[in-house]
Image (tube, grey):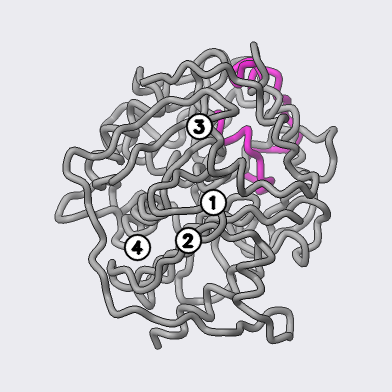
Amino acid sequence: MEQNIEAVGLAALGLFSGARQYENFSRIRSFVSTKTMQPSSVPFDFPDGEPIDLPETYSCRGETRSLPGLLEDTDTAALLVLKDGAVRYEQYYLTGGREVPWLSMSVAKSFLSALIGIALAEGAIASLDDPAERYAPFLKGSGYEGVSIRNILQMSSGTRWREDYVDPESEIFGLNGAMAPGGSHDDFLATMVRETTPGTLCQYNSADTQALGAILVGATGRSVADYMQEKICEPLGMEAPSFWIQDSRGMELAYAGLLMTARDFAKLGELYRKRGAWEGRNIVPADYVDASLTIAAPHLAVGQPLVGGYHFPLGYGYQWWFPDGDIGEFSAIGVYNQYVYVDPSRGVTIVKLSANPRYGLSHDDEDNKDAENIQAFRSICSLFD
């Protein structure tokens, strides 16, 4: 399963510096050590539907903007549009390609959430209200002691955190440092301290997802990659090899280190669009999917989550984001504009893989384009009205 590549750390990429990353994101395995997940023994190939032409424009912040311009400005590598499970648009750019595994960034969080739901259904996790240290004893004495798995899923652990890509002193840079040779994500998690009451503040915290990874490993007795191979890659018919980045001790980069093709990323969106069912088989319990896609408390509502100290214009569930509105949209989102976006009201799933060079240069959405991409997806979805 393991690939013996000497990890030089993600710091070598110069992330959030303005450097263009599309070459790196398509060959990340040259920089880090990974675990391999094999294609399914029965690969699933999405059927083709009638091709569509993308809209030329979309509306954003009171302006009409160019969709081709957005794709170019954000160094888009892949754009895939499914309608009712059929491919209606598929295009690759720059270093992207149908067979190219791309770095997920935080889209990985939504996959990890699905694995937690499966472990819960199988009884490996007894309850989402169990404290983290029941399954990851090394968290005892840290800021995670006594914090429920549910609160961690909702980015509401209460641990001190700054997910600030502009500030090199923020905790996210410390977490990334665990990927340096000799580094350990578990050791980093053990240093986390409590700052607020758990379950009262949604503060986007990549360490929370890394803690979920540790909980999953402790609960199942298996690595994240091994568990995902059996529970997601095989039944969903993943058509290409997938990879998890790992640290020097073999622990996966649970919060951001998944590499997959656009089509295989889309299968998670389709799975959740269909409430956890796939080809007549229940993969993730429907009630867990429903809870994952619900804003369950005021501090999770649209505009309440904090990212880098700034209110983010989306709501939050179990490692999924929700745009404002009443049609039930949800999205997995990663930095540099990675998306698995779903509009269940129209039966649409969109995957966009990107390397936006301006990401993290400021807190302004004019640079980061987190919310702007959602507006572009809505324009695409409107083609199916």
C-alpha gap between disc 2 and disc 3: 33 Å
Residue 52 vertical position relative to residue 77 in the rendered view, above or below: below
Crowd rating for badge 4 (residues with CA inside 10 Å; few <14, some 14–19, many 20+)? many
C-alpha span from label 4 to label 1: 29 Å
**Label 1 amino acid?**
Thr
| 312 over 372 or under it: above or below | above
Q: CA distance from mark 3 to mark 4?
A: 23 Å
Residue indicated by mark 3 = 212
Mark 2 lies on a secondary structure that is: strand
Q: Earlier in the sequence, mark 3 or mark 4?
A: 3
- Residue occupying image coordinates x 55% and y 76%: 325
Q: Which residues are magenta?
A: 183-212
Q: CA distance from mark 4 to mark 2?
A: 24 Å
Q: CA distance from mark 3 to mark 1?
A: 32 Å
Give the prevailing secondary structure in the magenta stretch.
loop
Of the numbered discs in the image, which one, if any, rests on residue 273?
4
Which dot marks residue 92?
A: 2
In this view, the mark in front (4 or 1): 1
- Residue 49's disc is none
Give whichever of 204, 168 is nearer the camera. Answer: 168
Amino acid at dot 2:
Tyr
Numbered disc in front, either 2 or 3 = 2
Disc 2 + disc 3, Cβ < 8 Å: no
Point out residue 208 in the picture as x, y percentages from the top left corner.
59, 35
Tell me where residue 31 appears, x and y as whole percent. 60, 28
